[in-house]
Amino acid sequence: MNKLNIANENRVVSFFQGNIKLVLYSIAIIAAVFFSYNFWQKRQNEYINASSYIYSQMLLAINNADAKATHKAAQALIKEYKNTVYAQIAALQLAKEAVEVDELDLATVRLQWVVSQKNPITKSIAATRLARVLVINGETEAALNLIDKEYDKNYVFLFEEARAMAFLAQDNKDAAREALLLAYKQMPEENVLTEQKNKAPWLELQMRDVGAFVDKSENT
């Protein structure tokens, strides 16, 4: 071993001897971060799995028309798992229940919360449903303002349908006709949003009421 290698080895030894506490402290920090991350990831997985299970229970209850079980599962998702998209869907379900029993103030609170979240799908559904609730309450201008504020070009058919409802409440058939035509033309052929299944026939009826007609050969 030459003198240069011996000198380098001595420097390394000296470093570790002089900084052993720092090295041990650094190792302890790295270990703590590693185990904390693993613990956090495990808790996250448990959180997601638990919320997913309750969500599946809610869907099962909805499918079985079990209103009590549906409500219980939805409440649990909002209370215990509010940071998940499942909670947002649960809030949409509870808002629907509230509208059905004419508790529009409660429905408004539920929908406003979903609108304040970041998921674009649930946010758009909530905004358009909230607009409808506002129309029912006679607040058509507030509904139109909400639509303009939250308008998402990825969900034109949802927003234009809600806009048409507001215009019809104002007896503005020309504006409603234009909105309905746009909603119809922008509706995806295969719609992933549950509330839009079999919606085209309903739109067609609304369009006939305001004198709007679509040449279906354009879509073939």
Image (cartoon, rainbow, N blue to C red):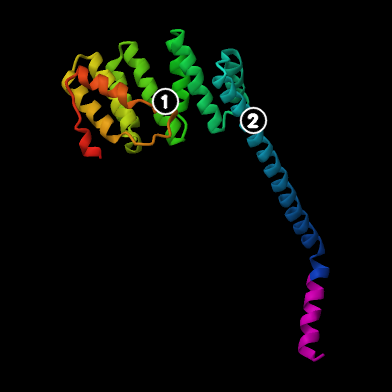
Mark 2 closeness class: few <14, some 14–19, many ≥20 residues within 10 Å = few
Q: Between marks 1 and 2, how big is the CA–CA gap?
A: 22 Å
Judged left or right of residue 209, residue 35 is right
* Residue placed most toward the observer, 117 or 175: 175
Q: N-terminal of the two: label 1 or label 2? A: 2
Judged left or right of residue 36, residue 177 is left
Q: Residue at x 57, y 21 (%)?
A: 74
Q: According to the image, label 2 marks what residue? A: 53
Q: Residue at x 61, y 32 (%)?
A: 52
Give the quarter of the image for residue 105: top left
Magenta span: 1-15
* Residue 162 visible (yes or no): no
Up the image or down, 22 lies above or below 69; here it is: below
Give the quarter of the image for residue 218: top left
The kind of residue on which mark 1 rests is Glu
* Residue 122 visible (yes or no): yes
Q: According to the image, label 1 marks what residue? A: 195
Query: Where, quadrant-wise, is the N terminus in this rendering?
Result: bottom right
Find residue 21 and report its horizontal and vertical position in percent. Answer: 81, 60
Q: Residue at x 30, y 25 (%)?
A: 161
Find residue 159 and report its horizontal and vertical position in percent. Answer: 32, 28
The kind of residue on which mark 2 rests is Tyr
